[in-house]
């Protein structure tokens, strides 16, 4: 199966090492450079993140689509703040304007304080996943209905909805490892997205999602998020990783941010923090930054030479991962390195692996 690479546009060239925490100011020079570097580097898509204090992801994606010709966009979107019929038309319009280069990443939301900033106060995690479930059902109905439809649900009541614009190609990405999340993913996800955990943990998550999806006659793809650290030799790569850990530690201490005794609000971060109890897992999985940050977001990596990291990524591919969302701690510089030194090697190894499987099956 073909492998897809997803990059990242975080609005400016900041990271845990550059500023100590994610800066959400919009830097147009950075956005233009990030678009160029990742399109030229062979990335298939870039993730545009969502947060209660960030620039609006769909608008940034529309801007990016106008400046590129091949690069796709994974637009992070949080249910509950836009009516699903409106969101369906917005995303379908973006799909049409971009020539089918848009996917949507549904972010249900796990942090109460982040949800509250946009007015979602008092909802529980279970309620949010139930809302996402209903929301996605309406979204797909708006995209496919050939006649007006009504909807009467726990969160939305709709009368005679019908959209004149439909998407041509708009995959739905969905993440979360709680039982509620796995259930919603099985029903709706075209691609299930998870963070970089051990091979054993990733195999377990894939098995759970496949079992959930099978109940609905579905077979999703799988996306794994990683922060690769690569260098000319393995020793240099691990030295680089150790330097990153110290930079993150110093930056967090300078900003008064905790570096231990974390209590993440979401199931995925708690799982990842358990993985990070050891600095190094499997052969190349590196969890140094996850330890310091409380596994906040995509914070684990693979460390080694491009060849070694590509071999490790192949092992995840063998489990069923067909998308890799990768970003670095020097956002622009690392994206350029990945496009030049890592992506071609991974594609070559996966192509050879697939060819061998086809030969053995014939």
Image (cartoon, grey):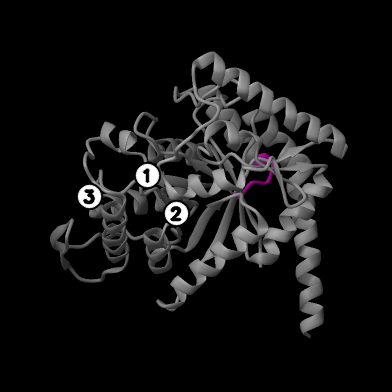
Query: Residue 15, relative to residue 291: is it above or below?
Result: above
**Which residue position holds label 3?**
83
Of the 4 image quadrants, the one containing the C terminus is: bottom right
Q: Quadrant of residue 201?
A: bottom right
Of the 4 image quadrants, the one containing the N terminus is: bottom right
Closer to viewer: mark 1 or mark 3: 1
Residue at disc 2, secondary structure: loop
The magenta segment is: 39-44
Query: Residue 362, relative to residue 247: is it above or below?
Result: below
Q: Of callouts 2 and 3, which one flags the residue occurring earlier in the amino acid sequence?
A: 3
323 is within the stretch colored magenta: no
Pointer 1 local density, CA inside 10 Å: few below 14, some 14–19, many at least 20: some
Which residue is found at the position 75% from the left and 47% from the top? 284
Residue at disc 1, secondary structure: loop
**Which residue position holds label 2?**
176
Q: Of callouts 1 and 2, which one flags the residue occurring earlier in the amino acid sequence?
A: 1
Place of residue 33 in the rendered image (x, y in percent of width and height, measured from the top left) = 60, 29
Q: Quadrant of residue 49?
A: top left
């Amino acid at each position: 199966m073909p492998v897809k690479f997803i990059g990242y546009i975080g609005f400016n060239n900041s990271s845990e090492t550059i500023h100590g925490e994610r800066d959400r100011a919009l830097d147009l020079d950075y956005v233009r450079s990030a678009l160029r570097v990742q399109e030229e580097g062979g990335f298939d898509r870039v993730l545009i993140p969502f947060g209660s204090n960030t620039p609006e992801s769909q608008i940034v994606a529309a801007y990016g689509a106008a400046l590129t010709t091949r690069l796709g966009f994974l637009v992070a979107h949080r249910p509950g703040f836009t009516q699903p019929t409106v969101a369906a038309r917005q995303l379908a319009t973006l799909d049409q304007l971009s020539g089918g280069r848009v996917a949507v990443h549904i972010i249900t939301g796990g942090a109460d304080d982040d949800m509250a900033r946009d007015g979602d106060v008092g909802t529980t995690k279970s309620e949010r996943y139930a809302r996402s479930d209903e929301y996605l059902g309406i979204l797909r109905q708006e995209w496919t209905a050939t006649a007006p439809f009504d909807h009467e649900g726990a969160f939305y009541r709709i009368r005679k909805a019908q959209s004149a614009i439909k998407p041509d190609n708009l995959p739905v990405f969905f993440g979360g490892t709680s039982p509620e999340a796995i259930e919603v993913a099985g029903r709706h996800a075209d691609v299930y997205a998870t963070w970089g955990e051990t091979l054993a943990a990733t195999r377990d998550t894939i098995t759970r999602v496949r079992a959930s999806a099978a109940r609905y006659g579905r077979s999703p793809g799988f996306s794994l998020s990683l922060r690769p650290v690569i260098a000319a030799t393995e020793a240099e790569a691990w030295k680089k990783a150790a330097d990153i850990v110290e930079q993150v530690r110093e930056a967090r201490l300078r900003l008064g941010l905790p570096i231990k005794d974390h209590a993440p609000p979401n199931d995925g971060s708690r799982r990842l923090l358990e993985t990070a109890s050891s600095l190094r897992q499997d052969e190349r999985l590196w969890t140094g930054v996850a330890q310091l940050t409380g596994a906040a977001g995509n914070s684990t990596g693979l460390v080694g030479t491009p060849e070694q990291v590509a071999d490790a990524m192949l092992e995840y591919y063998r489990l069923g991962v067909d998308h890799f969302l990768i970003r670095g701690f020097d956002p622009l510089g690392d994206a350029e390195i990945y496009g030049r030194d890592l992506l071609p090697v991974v594609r070559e190894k996966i192509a050879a692996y697939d060819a061998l499987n086809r030969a053995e099956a014939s």
